[in-house]
Amino acid sequence: MKKLKYFLAISTIFVVTSCGDYLDSENLYGVSLETFYKTPTDINQAMSGVYNAMYTNNVLSEEQMAANLMDNMMLGAGGSDDKAAKWVDNFEDPVEDTYRDMWVQSYNGIARANAIIEKTEIADFSKYFTTNEEAEKFKKQAIGEALFMRAFFYFRLAKFFGGVPLIVSVDGSKTVARATYTETFAQIATDLKLAIETMPATPFPSIPTSSYGHANKWVAEAYLARVYLFYTGYMTNIEQKATTDLPLIGGTALSATDVTSYLNDCITNSGHALVSDFRNLWPYSYVNKSAGSTVLPWAVTNNLSWAGQDGKAPTFGTGNLETMFVQRFSFGDWGWRDGYRYTNRLCLFTAIRGNSMVPFGQGWGWCTINPKLWNDWGDNDPRKLGSILQVGKAEQGTDSYQADQGDHETGYFNKKYTSLQHGSASGNKGMFVQMYNWSNADMQLMHAQDFIFMRYADVLLMHSEITKTATGMNAVRARAGLSAVGYSLDAIKEERLHEFAFEGLHWFDLIRWGDVTTAFNDSFPVRNSGTAATYTVKYRTETKGLMPIPETEVRLSNGVYNQNPGW
Amino acid sequence: MKFTKLFIFCFLSILFSIYGQAQDVTVKGKVYDQNGLPIPGVSILIKGTSKSITSDFDGNYQIKAASKGTLVFSFIGYNTAQEPINGRNRIDVKLYSSTEALQEVVVVGYGTQKKGLLTGASVNLKGEDLAALNTGSVMDALQGIAAGVNITKNNGAPGAGTRVTIRGLGTIGNSNPLYIVDGISVGNIDYLSPSDIESIDVLKDAASAAIYGSRAANGVVLVITVKGRKGKSAKISYDFYYGIQNIYKNLDPLNAQEYMYIMDEGRVNDGLAPNNWNTIVHNNNWLETNYPGAGKQLGDDVWNQLQAGWKGTNWINEMTKKDAPVVNHSLNISGASEDVVYSAGISYFDQDGIIGGNITDAGYKRLTARFNTQMVLKKNDRHSIITVGENFTYTNSQNRSIANGNIYYNDLHNGLVQNPLQPAYWQTSIDRNINEFGYTPTLDGLNAGQTNPLAVMFYRNNYNYGKGNNIIGNAFLEIEPVLNLKFKSVYGIDSWFGHSRSMDPTFHLGLNYVDNVNGASQSEYFGANTTWTNTVSYDRKFGNHKITAVVGTELIQNQINNNVSGSRNNLLFPGDPKYAYINNTESPSSINQINVSGADWAAGGGATQSFFGRAQYDYKEKYLLSATMRADGSSNFAKNNRWGYFPSVSAGWVITKEDFMSSSSKILNFAKLRASWGQNGNQSIPNFIYSSQIAYVFPGYFFGDTKPVSGTTAYPEKVTNPDIKWETSEQLNIGIDAKMFDSRLGITLDWYKKTTKDWLVEAPILGTFGAGAPYINGGNVENKGVELSVNWNDKVGDFKYGITISGAKNKNEVTKIANADGIIHGSSNVLSQGTSEISRVQVGQPIGFFYGFKTAGILQNQDEVDAYVTPSGAPYFNDQRPGDIRFVDQNKDGAIDEKDKVYLGNPNPDLELGIQLNFEYKGVYLNTTMAGKFGMQLMQSYRSFADNFDQNYTSDIFNRWHGEGTSNTMPRLTATSNRNTNYISDIFMHNADYLRINNLTIGYNFNELLSNFKFMSNLKLYVAVNNLYTFTKYNGMDPEVRFGHDASWASGVDLGLYPQARTVMFGLSVDF
């Protein structure tokens, strides 16, 4: 009897430990794919995720960094340990995977966009809005924006790598071969066209500040023109297959006329306009105001006042209707995961090396500037001093500059994207750190300046280039106080060089115009950390302006991806 | 009911039979061993009762017993003897040693077994032997003692922990063995004081470990804490030692004059003018700007001192604490009454750090308290029926460490590379309110970015205060309703809780070393894992056949894992850490002055659930057979892949029990052949790999005018792998145990082959997947090896001695990685900022092998330069010159590039050796333990040579190439970044073979002198030296280098590793 009791007790315990679903668990700190993409809030968070893919850990994989290094108007430089900057500058790639972060992050962005495009389409958001129309409008903006971002990432991939694998659905195969150059651009053009047709035509000044940073119909129109010019220029001048059409999926194509009508729509209806003074686009125009005293005398002399970077009614600045599409940057933090990539490293890397002055602070001295640009640029153009930072000038605050701190020294640095700082109660601190009252004053993490991908000035210049008329170009010239000129491609080339210097566009302009083959014949003296040297770079035509497909991706594809020529 | 009556009847009748006949006699006697030497501590039990005593130091005993009773004499390591009293008053007994310790019972999974019947490969160690080595943690003591168990100290810092690898790395994930303390799995056993440990059993082969199925793929370490012993009266023992620690081998950074000479040589080699040092030391812009006049004053002071022959600052000496103390007390009490056995222990360990101990009070303190009891609640005359008990250990520890990681987080490295021209302290900095502790501000004329390494060490580490606690243990119930049928239910808990706070100080010591914002942060954590195990076991003998079986279930859950932390800027009472609490900060004026986080990582549930069984059979203890099966379910896998099944079989044949061997039994006392095969599982991956999860990321993206605060952002973080399943480690083991020459010689030999299949690995995937790589069952790893352990114990008169030598050879090879690349890459920027990866995991190579260019010496002269050409006759580099390295063009394609990088070396040893020697003569004893590792390489770099050229060298640099024939391994100096060093090559690699005398103890046991003092015995006094000497050709501080980089599988990278101290100790132990 007693034995039986024992056995009963024992069996009970065994049963208790054997049953029950102890093994089921729930992830409280992440949402399951099955339940996500079901509410407008989910879509907004997922949309942030798409834009988040613009950040890359490797600075060389940042489009703006790589494009500036490769451009003929910027050198490699940095210190003697910055071999990689010089390799990119010189079209060399002795190591592997230099651009892999760009490749991987672009596809991450594409996958996130694919999910929004598919899931938003089938979702029912009516209960989250007062009317069905509002719900429909939300969906259209979301789908259109995701289509735009997908095109944005494919365009970035195509510019650097040529034809790439096209992944356009959530569940489709991910192990596909590279599409052709034309197929890739057809995908980009189709997405942009659909994005234009899908997104509401809200004029930029009417879009609430809280939505600033989101792509819209006007951005898509401007990008379609940029894609059109790049594709037709590349096919004509690099592939030697002259064309004036941008293909769409399904065999149709967009002509110059089609693209012009999009640009006309943008010019007429977007509400975008040029900032009155070109120099007010750049934060150096704000540094005196931030410091509360004159730390940049030149800005006072020229009566500069920053337009700001939050759209029509920014927290800081007078209002900016020109900037159309940016990569937003804030502060970094070494303690966050990949925390350094949230600050604008173009500012850090191209700022003056080994000199911490006010207001131009210390950086790594990459992308020093080809003296030819300085020499050939008329002094009557305020954009010259508005773009190039001269050292040894008291009015610029650079009179205490000590030379020979870095390589490829020419005495000229990037002024649009640079390190800005001024005094505070506790010593010199970054301008943005003081503006935003941020606690981490690390000079490597303090560049909360957005990187501008598209300005309205580009819409005007592209309009001139596509229509072969001078109106747009002369509007841009007029803003710089320059007289009107007649249309010619050479005039456009010079105008774009001066308007967009160091904005990551000139390298791609050189390619599409076919000038890339002749642009790198310069040879001139520089100083390498105290030693006199001669600077030359070797562009190799066989690369057709493309970079190597990341070697690891080629290996992981098991040879399905063929490497680009010349690499 | 019937049974109870029977039970009461039997019990009473025995009781009456004893007391009824109550013809008590007093029996005296002496217990000897076969050599006629008295044996103290022998348990003498009156058969059929629980009355027992132990023999004293001289083997004498005296007991009152019924004249018709029987005395049972037992002692570990000896055959038990029974002597009927038959009215005698004196019974002298000779105990024969059971063939060494083959009768000894050792711990196996969920039970115990006679050592002689083991069919698997395991190492059995006694706690007291480990405690005698006076190491801070138990695992430290195992080094060199257990063959096949590779123990590497993470570094020499107090409380730094160890990496334990059993029979080679089987995975690049978690390769730690499973630690089981009193049946409860725990993360590691550093929370235990060595004096708390009764025994450690390391289960190495699959069959021994298989009963632990899941989690056992890397081997199992079974720990039993000290228990009371039945039939023993209370024993109180006390151990104490005090030691002083000093750096064993110091590096020799260049002094000021040497530094300036070497720096100038680099410049001259590059065609530059030598430095103007006077200008450099005066060119302190930052200091001059912020504290006008101070920059010049510092320059004057430095320059004048240099002129007066000052040798500069030796930063390593500045941060070294001399004669750093280490102290340990442990008090143990154990005993038993009729139905209760108990053991309690309390110990305190306090070790100061030799690096930084003088600057930041670095060190490790640990208090442990343990209480183990076991009570028989019901019993009958033959066995206990209900037994309950508990084993609990509480630990409180405080670890104040210094930075000890990669080149950006390593205080010792900072000291090694800092220029010697900067004084460590500069009185003016106190007087002028530059720094309240007198740290010299940056000498920024030399390098604007540099800092004072002492100040960095102080401010980084000094204001962090934290304590951790563990409560680990179990409560159990054992029911034995019928003899040898036992049911046992054990509920165990492994809990941890603690708190920390820190003050964020302010300082102004250089351009890049300024902190203007102070603050306070606090954090608290609390967590607990529980294990509930239920087993039923049954032993039965049928004639010559014996069967033992156990079946059971186990449920392991993480019940709570709570972490809350916060910080706020702007202290109300700055400067005094006493007030550094979050409440004592100003009200925040902006969101970025606050930082909080909180989560309970266990709240989502999940568990590991298991069913297991084992059957053992032996025939006359001659033919042995054992089989186990375990089924494990883990929440880490999707429903249909949750369960893994892990079988094992093993067999043994005790040849010496065969009749035909009887003739040789004089020489060969015992021999057993063993073979085992089994599988174990590994499930250590993050949860939810199988299901697609949207992760919330921070920062996300910045829409609107909310900068610098980002909006909520989410995306699918990883590609889903619903098919992920258990990793299996399969192992075949063949071994032999032998005892020869009257058991004086013992030999254990094992051969094994361990294959890890379906390796859980995070292998890279194509970018087009659009999310992070998931864990996959992505490869195979093979470890093959041989282990040999030989011991000889003998006695010549009063001189006893013992020698144990163990060796283990292991070959590690990755045989498959299931992606097209076949490579898992290591980090770059390890040896210096701006350098490429140095270690990899790749098919056909050992895990973590070193990777880079092979070199073929230095170009000695212009002829050699001219001869260093590509197959087409062009020079490899346009600027190559004498003193440059001759890199090997492996593929002869005329370029030195990625394709020429090859295997350079292996950080894992081929051979490990352990030697133990014990001598004893009339109470004087000498013990030593040595451990060695052979056949491994390591990579050494103390300087960030690719970007910080002004960093200091060690005096090894005098062996550089500086003219024909001066060096064939170390290239010429340069003043800038140069491919000679920037191309990761074998010039950084060194052989790291070593043999270390881990411990040498000389002591005296006062037993004979104290034989008249009954209250006290075993008084020992000793002097010991830990880390006495290391035989090695390696030129660094220590050839034992655990550090790799971010990846846990990497090791063997010496960037200036916290060295192990040499400790001289004095100790005493005594029993009452």
Image (cartoon, coloured by chain):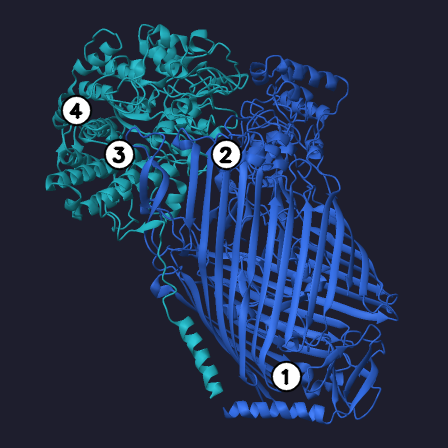
Chain colours: A cyan, B blue
Expressed as whole percent of the image width and height from the top left, the position of residue A89 reads 42, 26
Please state the chain letter of the residue tagged with numbered disc 4 in the rendered image.
A
Q: Where A285 sits versus A121, above or below?
A: above
Left or right, B48 with respect to A12, comes to: right
At which x and y percent is residue B384? 59, 81
- Taking B757 as reference, is A144 above or below it? above
Residue at figure coordinates x 48%, y 74% from the top left: B552
| Front residue of this view, candidates B986 and B1023 | B1023
Callout in the foreground (4, 2):
2
Figure check: B928 above or below A155: below
Marks 3/2: CA–CA distance: 49 Å
Residue type at tag 2: Asn
The numbered mark 3 sits on a residue in which chain? A
Which residue has dot 3 on it?
A152
Is residue B977 shown above or below A352? Answer: below
Residue B868's x, y, as percent?
A: 59, 33
**Residue drawn where x is 58% and y is 86% of the image:** B546
What residue is disc 1 on?
B621
Mark number, residue A18: none
Answer yes or no: is residue B216 visible: no
Asked if the residue under mark 1 is in contact with the one under mark 4, i.e. CB atoms within 8 Å, the reply is no
Please tell me whether mark 1 sits on a helix, a strand or a loop: loop
Mark number displayed over residue A270 = 4
Q: CA distance from mark 3 to mark 4?
A: 20 Å
Q: Nearer the viewer, mark 2 or mark 1?
A: 2
Q: Quadrant of the C terminus of chain A?
A: top left
